[in-house]
């Protein structure tokens, strides 16, 4: 709209108009509700009107009826007054509700947008943005935006409107009394703002100290053994007492301020009233003040206080929301590196037979030093490849390239001769079944963990998946079977059972390729046998790439790829590689022969 | 429909725990109430005086109004001055009484929190394990605040409401009985509506908070499991689930807002009704000349005095209920008796003056069980172990995972309680050794090498807070941590943890070792302290431990061979039983389990060499 003035760089422009830019962006979320916003603004003058007219009605009834004793028409005034009060309360209720709905809806939309954005990010995003930080953006930061709408923005305009209205009405009633009242205003405003901001600061300080105490206690309880071992109880208690005592002294101070704040409005308005009586008496001769006017003035003064008191807190709310919005938008501005929608190939990956896989001149790194260097590997349809090698030689990175967790820095990954980057991402991921070392389970039911939100999956299908993965027997044994509860991270299932559930889950999309990072941790012998059986079912009719840690897995593989320092060191069948007497033979002797010793001991060190 | 299920839920909640009598619940407070009895009395007197002053204000206003109506301007001025004076006195009394009473609440909160913290520090681990850490912490913070509200504002509100009614009603009745009855008529209704709304709002805000918690954990879990979601191409389905979650949160908020928004208008209406009656009926009385204009003004003033205490009535009950619930949660912990003591009589420095003693350990028929909450049963961890550890020996403990090695160390260090007369140090049963003496002669470097978010220096001298830097550096050197420590941004002042540096696993292990070693204990217990340390460093530290000029008995859980080769005697544990003992050479010949474990360890080491 307004072109940047010459000589002003983008950087400085951003700094200057930062709030406007943020607000402008934010308003795009408010646009769907513009009709509601118009209604909210239209209600403001109505609300002000209902408040401003009440004192006038009282004045009228006192001066024209009660004082004079002329009760004709009094009943109408009284009923009118009652109606006004009811109208004011009704309007204020509608306003509260409307602002709440607006804030909640806009924030709900913002949250959904942000969540969609997060879900579409690639893995590197989650390395730089910790889960705590992201959760905070999605919950607390959005909540402070809600505060701005439901308690701040619109009310602020309403309050200003009311303040002006009260001033005008007072002047219309009595010039003299208005001037007296006005003279006290600077004192009242300054004192109110000062006390309020001090109370808020003190409360904030107290919250910080509470958080300190609670993190101190948390850390201490988590390390209670160490505290006891080193006989630190007394010392720790002194430290805790120190902060507890600081908290006490600080909160006692703020308690005093709070009690002053609590009494301030009432005391001040009574004092102003005393002043009005004093001058009312003096004005008796020149400009007689009626009793009704006096009562109306008291009423107006009371109505002035709340907006004044809330003014500074509303600005703070706005400020907090601005910072929150800035953080939210900067998160939204982080674009995923992985291009998700670049389907440009002429043929989608065929859907029937196990496909061939080709790693073509692949190099890969995470920003520094190459993790994989010039990998060339062709895998036949239905072939079973075991990947072995010392830790940290790029095994995991290699399999992650296959489902596009990452894209290679150089080279191509081809499935059935198609560069996977030319295929729709979801297609690629559905055709590559990925089994991690540790199976992550979500809180919820077994069924929910199998379907992962797919409402079309039938319970029969789930049972089938579980049966194929050898997981049905132990699920069947649970009281709720498919609806059995899964606790956080699946800790109510054993490692072996979690692994089997992971197997079952991967079958949902009928993948034609299976990629597996075999678990290194040991499981009980029963689970171990079930896992091996399930694996046979799973691998049948699929092209497979397995990071192998167990001898049996290696023995079952068609070929073995030995990785070392990001390069393919050796490749071939078990026998051929043993004969070569190279790295594989060495690894085999050291690592896998353990499996020949009694399983118990092998699993234990 | 809704309300019946609510009450059903409520009674179910109540039914789960036997309701404690009020007297039992108040037990933790009794002593504090006694201590502050005079304070509460003073507070009450101040409140009573304050209410008296408050009641004088509408009356002065009445006099001023009547004077103004009669055109007596001098009297109006006098009354205006009186009004100003009374208002100021009232303000002082009001601020004073509130502050005085709230401060007592704060004082008791402070004392109770200290008492609670002290109790936590003396409890056994199995006593603490009954609750999650977060739960224990919230008792010390959130519940303590609820208790303070019970003591301070709770007392104030009850006293103030009673006083407000006691002072105003007689005055109003004296002025005009009929008008008084009419004006007060809506108040019971106010109490009823306020109570009703408060109760229902409590349920709704609980639901709102629950919904927010659910949204947060959904987000948190989605982020943790993002790899799974993406690998299964379930992004769009997850967005749909979030759509539902955020909708549920929105609806819960809306339900709350609907009722919450009603609160202020309804209270305004209930209060306004009284004023309206005064205006409508009282106005007529003034016109008839039965009341003066001043009476009319005063009536409105008195009614205003009553409205807020009345509205607050529902709130008081909620505050009291929450306070009592918090008290009983606190009492759950306070009634426990731990074995540790807080106040250790002897001073830390003594440990360094004391000459090196010879400490042998003998274990006799030691069996130990763990309470498994899941199995609701006891699990045997150690099974009838008897062994002797000679003074100044270096002892290795080996065994498969879960064989009870760590538990044995924990029992020796008395962070778990062994059965009586099963562990002896220098022939003295461990439970008979005073805490201070025991801690002085024994140190453990645990497997979970927990460091605290305090400076590196204070982490190292955790058990001897007066230790000088020179000694600290010496032990950092012995544990091969000196060079790394020197490179920390602020040296020894560097904070450990979130707000400071994050130490690697190996650094933490060595720091934990230094922390134990610097105590110069007679018995040094080490639980797998080298698992993240490279072999060369391990070797040099082992040598330093061995060459140390201060003799100590050392018991070490070993997972690597270097230590085994250096040990004077090795105990082999399997499934909680002691299955073999002897030095390395003997065990290789005699124990199949040991042989396998050893082979396993050497392979692992060789494998690490390949890499």
Image: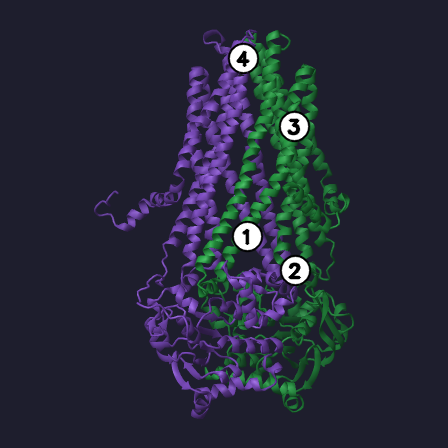
Chain colours: A purple, B green
Quadrant position of the C terminus of chain A in the picture: bottom right
In this view, the residue in front, B88 or B289, is: B289
On the image, the x and y values in percent for residue A16 come to: 31, 45
On the image, the x and y values in percent for residue A263 come to: 57, 30
Question: SS at mark 3?
Answer: helix
Q: Residue furthest right?
A: B421
Q: Which of pointers 4 and 2 indicates the residue nearer the eye? A: 4
As drawn, is B366 to the left or to the right of B211? right
Q: Which of pointers 1 and 4 indicates the residue nearer the eye? A: 1
Q: Which residue is mark 2?
A: A233
On the image, the x and y values in percent for residue B42 come to: 70, 33
Q: Dot 3 surroundings within 10 Å: few (below 14), some, or many (20 or more)?
A: few
First in sequence, mark 3 or 1: give its number: 3
Marks 3/4: CA distance? 28 Å
Q: Which residue is mark 1?
A: B214
On the image, the x and y values in percent for residue A440 come to: 53, 66
Q: Which of pointers 3 and 4 indicates the residue nearer the eye? A: 3
First in sequence, mark 4 or 2: give its number: 4
Q: Dot 2 surroundings within 10 Å: few (below 14), some, or many (20 or more)?
A: many
Question: SS at mark 1?
Answer: helix
> Visible in this render: residue B46?
no
Q: Residue at x 60, y 23 (%)?
A: B273
Marks 3/2: CA distance? 55 Å
In this view, the residue in front, B286 or A515, is: A515
């Amino acid at each position: 709209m307004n072109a940047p003035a010459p000589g002003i760089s983008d950087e400085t422009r951003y700094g200057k108009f930062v709030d406007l830019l943020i607000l402008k962006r934010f308003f795009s979320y408010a646009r769907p509700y513009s009709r509601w916003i118009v209604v909210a603004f239209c209600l403001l003058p109505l609300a002000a009107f209902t408040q401003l007219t009440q004192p006038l009605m009282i004045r009228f009834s006192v001066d024209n009826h009660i004082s004079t004793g002329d009760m004709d028409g009094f009943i109408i005034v009284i009923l009118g007054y009652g109606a006004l009060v009811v109208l004011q309360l009704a309007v204020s209720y509608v306003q509260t509700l409307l602002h709440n709905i607006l804030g909640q809806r806009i924030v709900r939309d913002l949250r959904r947008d942000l969540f969609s954005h997060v879900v579409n990010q690639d893995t590197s995003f989650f390395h730089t943005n910790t889960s705590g930080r992201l959760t905070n953006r999605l919950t607390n930061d959005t909540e402070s935006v809600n505060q701005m709408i439901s308690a701040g923005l619109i009310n602020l305009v309403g309050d200003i409107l009311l303040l002006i209205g009260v001033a005008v009405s007072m002047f219309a009633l009595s010039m003299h009394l208005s001037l007296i009242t006005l003279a006290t205003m600077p004192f009242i405003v300054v004192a109110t703002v000062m006390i309020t901001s001090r109370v808020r600061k003190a409360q904030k300080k107290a919250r910080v100290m509470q958080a300190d105490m609670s993190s101190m206690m948390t850390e201490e309880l988590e390390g209670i053994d160490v505290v006891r071992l080193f006989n630190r109880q007394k010392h720790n208690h002194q430290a805790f007492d120190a902060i507890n005592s600081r908290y006490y002294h600080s909160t006692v101070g703020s308690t005093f301020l709070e009690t002053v704040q609590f009494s301030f409005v009432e005391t001040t308005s009574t004092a102003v009233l005393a002043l009005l009586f004093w001058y009312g008496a003096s004005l008796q001769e020149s400009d007689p003040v009626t009793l009704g006017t006096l009562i109306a003035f008291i009423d107006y003064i009371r109505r002035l206080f709340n907006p004044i008191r809330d003014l500074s807190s509303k600005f703070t709310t706005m400020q907090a929301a601005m910072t929150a919005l800035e953080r939210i938008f900067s998160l939204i501005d982080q674009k995923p590196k992985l291009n998700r929608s670049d389907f440009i190939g002429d043929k989608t990956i065929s859907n029937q037979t196990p496909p061939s896989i080709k790693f073509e001149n692949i190099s890969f790194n995470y920003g520094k030093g190459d993790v994989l260097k010039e990998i060339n590997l062709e895998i036949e349809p239905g072939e079973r490849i075991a990947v072995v090698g010392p830790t940290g030689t790029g095994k995991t990175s290699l399999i992650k390239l296959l489902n596009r967790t990452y894209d290679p820095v150089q080279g191509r990954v081809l499935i059935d001769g198609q560069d996977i980057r030319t295929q729709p991402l979801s297609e690629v991921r559905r055709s590559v079944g990925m089994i991690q070392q540790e199976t992550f389970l979500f809180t919820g039911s077994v069924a929910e963990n199998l379907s992962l939100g797919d409402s079309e999956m039938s319970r029969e299908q789930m049972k089938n998946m579980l049966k194929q993965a050898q997981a049905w027997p132990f699920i069947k044994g649970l009281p709720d079977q498919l609806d059995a509860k899964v606790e956080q991270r699946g800790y109510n299932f054993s490692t072996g059972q979690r692994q089997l559930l992971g197997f079952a889950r991967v079958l949902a999309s009928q993948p034609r390729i299976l990629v597996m990072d075999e678990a290194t941790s040991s499981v009980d012998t029963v689970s171990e046998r079930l896992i091996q059986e399930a694996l046979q079912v799973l691998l049948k009719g699929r092209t497979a790439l397995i990071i192998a840690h167990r001898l049996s897995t290696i023995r079952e593989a068609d070929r073995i790829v030995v990785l070392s320092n990001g390069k393919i060191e050796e490749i071939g069948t078990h026998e051929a590689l043993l004969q070569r007497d190279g790295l594989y033979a060495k690894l085999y002797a050291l690592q896998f022969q353990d499996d020949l010793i009694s399983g118990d001991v092998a699993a234990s060190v | 429909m809704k309300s019946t299920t609510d009450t059903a839920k409520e009674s179910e909640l109540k039914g789960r725990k036997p309701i404690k009598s009020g007297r039992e619940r108040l037990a933790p407070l009794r002593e504090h109430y006694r201590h502050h009895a005079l304070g509460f009395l003073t507070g009450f007197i101040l409140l009573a005086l304050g209410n008296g002053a408050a009641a004088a204000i509408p009356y002065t206003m009445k006099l001023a109004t009547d004077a103004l109506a009669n055109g007596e301007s001098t009297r109006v001025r006098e009354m205006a001055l009186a009004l100003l004076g009374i208002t100021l006195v009232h303000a002082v009394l009001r601020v004073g009484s509130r502050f005085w009473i709230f401060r007592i609440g704060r004082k008791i909160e402070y004392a109770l929190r200290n008492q609670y913290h002290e109790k936590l520090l003396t409890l056994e681990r199995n006593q603490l394990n009954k609750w999650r850490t977060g739960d224990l912490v919230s008792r010390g913070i959130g519940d303590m605040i609820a208790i303070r509200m019970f003591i301070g504002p709770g007392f104030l509100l009850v006293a103030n409401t009673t006083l407000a009614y006691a002072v105003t009603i007689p005055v109003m009745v004296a002025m005009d009985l009929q008008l008084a009855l009419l004006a007060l008529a809506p108040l019971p209704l106010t109490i009823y509506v306020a109570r009703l709304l408060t109760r229902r709002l409590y349920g709704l805000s609980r639901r709102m908070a629950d919904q927010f918690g659910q949204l947060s954990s959904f987000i948190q879990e989605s982020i943790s499991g993002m790899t799974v979601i993406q690998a299964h191409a379930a992004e769009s389905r997850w967005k749909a689930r979030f759509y539902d979650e955020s909708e549920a949160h929105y609806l819960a908020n809306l339900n709350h807002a609907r009722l919450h928004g009603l609160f202020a208008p309804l209270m305004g209406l209930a209060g306004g009704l009284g004023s309206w009656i005064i205006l409508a009926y009282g106005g007529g009385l003034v016109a008839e000349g039965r009341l003066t204009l001043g009476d009319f003004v005063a009536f409105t003033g008195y009614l205003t005095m009553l409205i807020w205490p009345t509205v607050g009535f529902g709130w008081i009950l909620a505050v009291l209920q929450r306070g009592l619930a918090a008290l009983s949660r606190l009492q759950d912990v306070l009634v426990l008796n731990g074995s540790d003591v807080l106040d250790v009589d002897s001073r830390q420095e003594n440990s360094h003056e004391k000459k090196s003693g010879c400490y042998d350990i003998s274990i006799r028929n030691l069996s130990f069980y763990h309470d498994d909450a899941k199995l609701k049963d006891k699990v045997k961890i150690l099974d009838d172990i008897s062994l002797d550890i000679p003074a100044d020996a270096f002892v290795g403990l080996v065994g498969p995972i879960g064989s009870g090695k760590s538990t044995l160390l924990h029992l020796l260090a008395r962070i778990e309680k062994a059965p009586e007369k099963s562990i002896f140090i220098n022939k003295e049963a461990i439970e008979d050794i005073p805490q201070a003496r025991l801690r002085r002669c024994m140190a453990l470097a645990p497997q979970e090498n927990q460091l605290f978010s305090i400076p590196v220096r204070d982490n190292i001298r955790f058990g001897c807070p007066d230790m000088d830097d020179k000694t600290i550096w010496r032990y950092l050197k012995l544990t091969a941590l000196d060079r790394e420590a020197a490179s920390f941004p602020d040296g020894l002042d560097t904070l450990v943890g979130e707000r400071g540096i994050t130490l690697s696993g190996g650094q933490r292990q060595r720091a934990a070792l230094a922390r134990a070693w610097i105590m110069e204990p007679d018995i040094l217990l080490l639980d797998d302290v080298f698992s993240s340390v490279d072999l060369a460093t391990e070797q040099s530290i082992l040598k330093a431990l061995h060459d140390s000029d201060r003799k100590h008995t050392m018991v070490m859980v070993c997972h690597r061979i270097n230590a085994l080769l250096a040990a004077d005697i090795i105990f082999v544990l399997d499934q909680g039983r002691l299955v073999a003992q002897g030095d390395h050479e003997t065990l290789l010949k005699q124990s199949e389990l040991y042989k396998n474990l050893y082979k396993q360890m050497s392979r692992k080491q060789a494998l690490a060499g390949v890499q």
